[in-house]
Structure formats: C-alpha cells, structure tokens
Amino acid sequence: MSATPPFKTSTRPRLFTPGPVEIPVRILRALSQVAPHHRTDVFRATYTKVSEDLKWLHQTQGEVLMLAASGTGAMEATVVNLMAPGAKALVLVGGKFGERWANLCKAFGVPYESITVEWGNAISPADVAAKLDADAAITTVFATQSETSTATWYDIQAIAKETRSRGKRLVVDAITGVGVHPLPQDEWGVDVIVTGSQKGLMSPPGVATVSLAPFALDAIEGDKLPRFYWDLRKARKSLPTGESAFTPPVSLIFAVGVAIAMMREEGLENVHRRHAKLAAAVRAGAQRIGFSLFSKSPANSVTALLPPAGVEASAVVKRLREVHGITVAGGQDHMKGKMIRVGHMGSYDLSDIYVVLGALEECVNALGHKADGACSAAREAWEAAS
Amino acid sequence: MSATPPFKTSTRPRLFTPGPVEIPVRILRALSQVAPHHRTDVFRATYTKVSEDLKWLHQTQGEVLMLAASGTGAMEATVVNLMAPGAKALVLVGGKFGERWANLCKAFGVPYESITVEWGNAISPADVAAKLDADAAITTVFATQSETSTATWYDIQAIAKETRSRGKRLVVDAITGVGVHPLPQDEWGVDVIVTGSQKGLMSPPGVATVSLAPFALDAIEGDKLPRFYWDLRKARKSLPTGESAFTPPVSLIFAVGVAIAMMREEGLENVHRRHAKLAAAVRAGAQRIGFSLFSKSPANSVTALLPPAGVEASAVVKRLREVHGITVAGGQDHMKGKMIRVGHMGSYDLSDIYVVLGALEECVNALGHKADGACSAAREAWEAAS
C-alpha cells in the first residue's frame, strides 16, 4: 500500500469520467461494422428505428432530432430555434453548464434574466415561479437536469409545473440526465430536452439530440434567430423519410441504436434504478473513507467528492491515473484542484464501483489518511437502495 | 445477362457514392478501439498528432481546426467567423453545394453577389476578377473545389490568384477536394479550406475541419457574426493544449488519424495521381459502353454520367443496387432521375473500378443497350494516365 509510482495495479485504462464513458463491447463492435450509405433504404430503416427508440427513451410522443454535433451544438440549436429576436429568456445557473446557457444567450444577443445559486445547491422552483411572475417578457426557461460540473441534480418535474402553468417554454440540458435520471418528457411537460451520445447512451461523442414534446413541435416555427445547420425545421421535414437534413454520423447512430437496444433489454425503470443504486454506493463508500459530498442535491450520473483533510484532490486524481489506470475528472473553474468527480453513468454495475472505490481507498491511505471499508459500505448502500 | 432481379451477383454491399465512401478495414478497426477520455494526455497526443497530420494534408503552416459536425457545419463556421455584420460576399455557384454558400449567406443576413454558371460548367477566374473589381465592398469569396452535385472541378489555383492579388479572402469548400485533387493551401494562397471526414479521408461522417492558412489566422478575429459552438477563436485557443473547445468525436478522430497515416504511406502526390487515374479509368470505361460525361470540367472525386439513349438513369441506379449490391448516387434537383454519379474517392483502386464498370456494363445490356469493353477501356486509360 505504501508503494509509490511507477508501481501499477492495472493492465488497462478505465474511465470513471462524467462522459465520455466506458463504451460496452457490443457498441464498440457496432462502430466497426461496414456502414451503408445514408441515402439507402437500409440506413433509412436504422435511422427511423433509432428515432423511435429515442422517443421511447425520452418517453415522448413528439420527435427526437439527431444532429452531428456535441452536446453544446444541440444547446445552441435550441437557443436559435426557440428564441425570436428580442424574446427574453430565463437561465438557471448552478455551475459551468448552466453558465453555458447564459453564454449562448449572450453570444446570440438574447436578452435574459438569470437565477444563480451557489455551486452544489438546488434551485428552488418557487424562485423560478417568482421570476416568471415578475417579468412577463420571459418566454423560455433554460435549465439543467444534472449539472455535471458540480454533480448536482435539479428538480425538473417541479420546475416544469411552474413553466407549464404559466404557458412558458422549458428547455432542459439533460446531457448527463437522459438514461440516468427519470425525465418523462410529456408527462412532466418539458418542451425541449437536449442530450448527447457519450453519457447515458454509452457511445462515443458526436451525436447530439433535441427532443421536442408534442406540445412543442410548433415552438421552432416562425421568425427566429438566424439558423441553417441547426435549423430544426429542416431536420423535422426530413425525419419522416428516414433521413437527416445533413450527412449524419452513420457509425455513431448505429452505436446509439445498440445502446438503446441494451437499455430496452434492461428496462428503462431498471436503468434509472440501477443508476440510483450506483450513486448511493459511491456516496456511501467514499464517505466511509473520509471523502465528503460536494453537492447538497447529488446527481446519479456523477459524484463530486471533497477529499479528507490533509489529502489533496489533485494528488488523488494523479495517483488514480498513475497507479490504478483510472481516469476521473477534477474540479472545474474555482473548484479546480479541490475536488474529484467520479462518473458512473452508462453500463456501470456494482463491480465497477468496487474498482473505483478500491482504488480510492488505496489512494487516501497512501496519501496519509488511514481508512478502510469503502467496498462494504458501498455494498450495504446498494442493498439498502434495492 | 438477361436474368432479372432478384437474381443477384453480390454477396455484400459496395459503396460507389460521392461520400460517405467505403471505409478501409484498418479504419473500421480504429473505430472499435477502446477510446481514452478526451482530457487525458493519451488523447491530447492523438489530437495534436491528427492536427499536425491535417496540416500536412492541407500543405499549410497555418492551423487545421476540427469540429464535431458534418461538412455543412464547417461551412457555416467559416461564414460566421469571417463575415462581419454588413460585409459583402461573392459566392460562386455551379451546383447544389455552391448554392449552399448562397443559402448560408441568406440565412445569416450576409449581403452577397454571385456568379452562377450552368451545372457542369467551369467558372471563369476572369469573371471572378471582374466582379471583385466592380464591387469594392466584397471582402470574401466563397468557392467550391469539387462540386459534388455535378462532378465538376473548379480551378482554385487560378481563382486564388485573383483574390490574393486584390487582398480578398478566399474560402473553399473542398469537401470532395481534399485528399483527391491537389490543393496546396499556402502555395496557392487559399485563406480557408473546409473538408469532412467521410470523403477523401475515408472515415465515417462526423468530423469536419476548417483549415486556416498562416495569412488567414487573423481572419476570424474581431467583430463578426454571432458565434458560439462555431467560434473558431475558442478552437484555436485550445489547440496548443491538445484539446478541442467542446467534446470532440473521439472515435472519429482516431479514424481520421489512421486515414492520414495511410495517405502518408502512399505519399500525397501518389494519392492525387491515383485519383486522377481512377477518374480517367471510370470516364473511359463508361464512355466505351455508351454513357456520356455530364461535366465539361470533370472532377476526380466523382463522375457524373448520362446514360445511353433509351436507358433510364433511375433504372441503372436501381439495377446496380438490386442485382449488384452497388450503391451509386443519382442526380439532384433538376437532374434527379437523369444521371448517375459514381464516387471513387478514398481507398479505391483499379480493381474497384472494374467492379463498378463490370456492373454498369451488365446493366446497360440488360436494359437494352448492347455494349462491351468497359474494363479494357478503363485499363487503357489508367495506363495512359500513369
């Protein structure tokens, strides 16, 4: 335990990052298949199938549009397709990705109000209601379900109640939300949901999606901000023909198709429940060995941990990488060097949690904090959550 | 030869489309490798290497920026990064992709002049010079090297002479140009070149690139159109750290890396020469069996063919698919149903040309046009071009 690098415990690298995540072998194999041309019946059938699968995943009767882009591209697409020149937005900011909504509004000259909470804190639906009541000019609220930078979960169901009852649009960045946390789009009344392929969908990055609820299909019509590549009207128009407006990332769409097949086999409720149990296990195990939780409203996709007193977060990140072959994320912006973020979304199971906790336990002991029992604490929490 | 479908000659599908193209097995394997996280030294090294490789491919000392997008996304990026509000463009239109420049200008409110030539005709550099001289407000010319919709090659070297001597910017869509036709960016004086992964780069779609010449690095600075996801200043800023501004399509970047390794092994001049020979072979073989060339300035990436009298283009496309398992493209817009487009960019060799010509020969005979000798004509043209 006191051995120092280059002592290594691992034969291969392992990812516990908040996306891109570990890609299951079934999906890796889909990526290497010989791909048909995108304007053929074979691919049209796949494209249509994956579109339908995505509706299942979002629990919507609306339409899920796929874009060749990373998640930020799909976020930008929602801003330029929903906001008319001069229309006002409300952005909810609790971390780096909430800030991205604000930065997008700024870049496109969209006037906006914001609700900013301290990193790791929840956003109060009552505050959202008050802002909407105070400023009738606000047409659209931009929110986040799972703030990856702080590992914090926001109560979208409660926020959607406030927007729906006031006839406002709600756009949710659920990039680390979909496939992890429940988010039944139509039932909760969420107009638009954005996600990406490299999180709950267990695929490489490069496909991002915009899901329009049935009651939001008209939200993209009319005079909006300038749009061409992101023009969702074009995407909607070509969807019934099994095609995308522009060349789709064919191999990645096959990957996403396999990912959703795997989720269908497991069952969506079971996928969500598994993530809740994984998160409970990580939290319990990490706390047992001296870490504390950064977030007051922790997400099930990623866990942000503050190290025990006397242990540097950056030393943990480094030792995880050098000794254990494990990549986790550190903190961002003002939390840089102060916390570690352990991702556990996608195909992870309890055995994977033993892997990362076993390594974390080695790290804190090697770095001077004596502690034991991370794995048994994780197992107990997993069982308790079952 | 007179057998009718469902008689089939093929055990597997084959692509002769103008992109996406056949993906070599080495690249398929790269796609299925276990990918590291993008914010790790391992991936940073790959990212930096591929960026440098792309500079080699573009023959530039400038910078080649990668975007998670299809080619149109990169085209949009050049418009919003180069055009300041009110600045005027000149777009060169000889087909559907030239029109795309015009549509992008329209969508973003960029005032523009255009030079429009009949499909399949070359664009005269003298006309470009005259337009530039007549309207001093034009700052930037948007051109195409290889117009995929008409299989037409434009003389970018000559056009660049006119733009450079007048201090105007030249942006070239070389999506089916790069890796096929010579386009030494710095030597010719081309400010910006756009390409995509699924053409000469032999990879699946999903990475698009914007190459800035050394003398064009400043072209994206200052007050431009609204930009966030496409903001090339962000891409430039993160490039020296081996990172992209937003999550990169990791698996596709590995694929592009392997593609350029293959091109380096062959040698760039040899790659260009092979494409010239492939194109000569296709043209000669197809003409021998009664097809005629649509373009008066044919490209080396794709060949547009008009069928012999009495044979329907759409029947050829259908029979190629149903009997031979071969996908080619048909005509677009007003040429829909009137021509076929045979792609031959990427990894193709003379044997592949035998495949498509042998099948075309079967098709025209089956459809009532007696003809023979496509393969020998192709071989002769290949040898003559060697």
Image: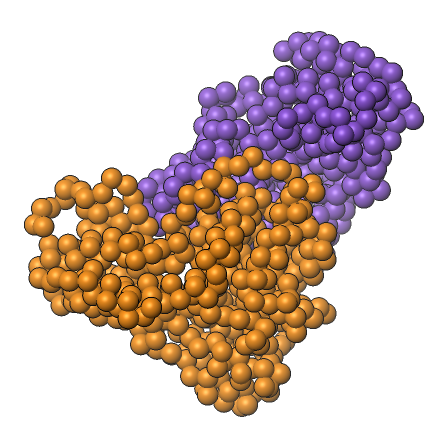
Chain colours: A purple, B orange
Please state which of residues B63 and B85 is positioned toward the viewer in this rendering: B63
Q: Quadrant of residue A316?
A: top right
Q: Is residue A79 left or right of residue B291?
A: right
Q: Is residue A26 visible?
A: yes
In the image, is A21 to the left or to the right of B100?
right
Taking the spot 69% from the left edge, 71% from the top edge, the residue there is B218
Q: Is A329 above or below relative to B57?
A: above
Q: Position of residue A79 (x, y in %)?
A: 62, 52
B144 relative to A235, above or below: below
Quarter of the image with the C terminus of chain A is top right
Seen in the image, is A50 located left or right of residue A202?
A: left
Answer whether residue A303 is visible to the viewer in this image: no
Residue lying at 13% horizontally and 68% vertically, measured from the top left: B309
Query: Residue B350 in the image: x percent, y percent?
Result: 30, 58
In the rendered view, tell whether residue A284 sits above or below residue A223: above
Which quarter of the rendering shows the N terminus of chain A?
Answer: top right
Residue A327, by quadrant, is top right
Where does the image place residue A365, in percent across and percent down from the top left? 84, 19
Q: How many marks?
A: 0
Classify B171 as above or below A6. Answer: below
Rendered location of residue A66, percent (x, y): 49, 45
Q: Residue at x 16, y 64 (%)?
A: B289
Question: Residue at the location (91% across, 25% down)?
Answer: A309
